[in-house]
Amino acid sequence: MADRKTNEVASLELGLKNVNLERTGDGYFVGSNYPIDARLAKEETEFDLNDPGQSPNARRVRWNQLMRENKGKIDVAAGQRFLADHLDTFENKIDPNERTLCGHIDLSARGSQPWQPPYGIAGAVQSKVTDAAMAEQMSLTSALGHACGIHFRAAEHLVRHPEFAWQKDNLRDMPSRPWTTFTSAR
Ligand SMILES: [Zn+2]
């Protein structure tokens, strides 16, 4: 959450037993499907916060790297770059897979356990970025498909990974579309 009038951002982690609210006027919050609070993680999930190869943990590391490296110069264009980022912090190399902010589980021999099998058809396929000035105008930028420009082609994926043939009748292409600015009607 953000309040552009007070220049404050907040993070609410809403568990069943643990509810954690953090606020800051000069910091940031990031997220990538991990429980933030160690106590909440232990009491309410089976998630291992200490496994750096897990997709949410690897992406958490990358988010914090990008926040440090870009401190004071994060704008909408930077946000768009971050969401198209392909650095795998576990292997420390550029490789679009389940550990990258621009998630490509369908390209990963690991998939994303226990959620997706190897080459499971999932990933980051809709991205949004806004800033305070745009939010004031009820406006945001959004990209459909992978933000990096890589297209998902259903037929090609099924040829390479016939174990998903059962999805054939319903599986569609997910072409990557350009960042587009949306503004509410006044
Ligand atoms: Zn990508």
Image: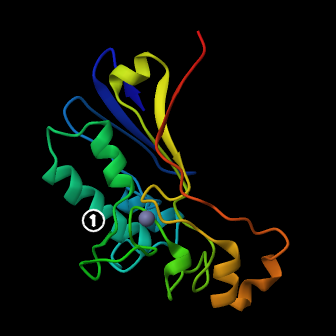
Which residue: 40% across, 33% down? 130
Which of the 4 image quarters holds residue 158?
bottom right
Q: So how many labels did they put on this image? A: 1
Q: Residues within 10 Å of mark 1 (few under 14, many from 20)?
A: some
**Lateral position of residue 163 relative to residue 142, left or right:** right
Ligand 1 lies in which image quarter?
Answer: bottom left
Tell which of 67 and 9 is nearer to you: 67
Query: Could you tell me if residue 154 is visible in this image?
Result: yes
Give x and y (percent) for residue 46: 52, 73
Q: Is residue 116 above or below residue 163?
A: above
The quarter of the image holding the N terminus is top left
**Lateral position of residue 150 relative to residue 99, left or right:** right
Which color scheme is applied? rainbow
Which residue: 29% across, 17% down? 6
Query: Could you tell me if residue 112 is visible in this image?
Result: no
> Where does label 1 land, which residue?
61
Give x and y (percent) for residue 3: 37, 22
Tell which of 180 and 37 is nearer to you: 180
Q: Is residue 70 above or below residue 47?
A: above
Q: Is residue 71 above or below residue 122?
A: above
Q: Which SS class for mark 1?
A: helix
Which residue: 35% across, 79% down? 51
Give x and y (percent) for residue 149: 46, 60
Give x and y (percent) for residue 11: 39, 40
Amino acid on which the number 1 mark rests in the picture: Val
Q: Residue furthest right?
A: 169
**Lateral position of residue 155 relative to residue 134, left or right:** right
The quarter of the image holding the C terminus is top right
Q: Is the CB of mark 1 within 8 Å of ligand 1?
A: no
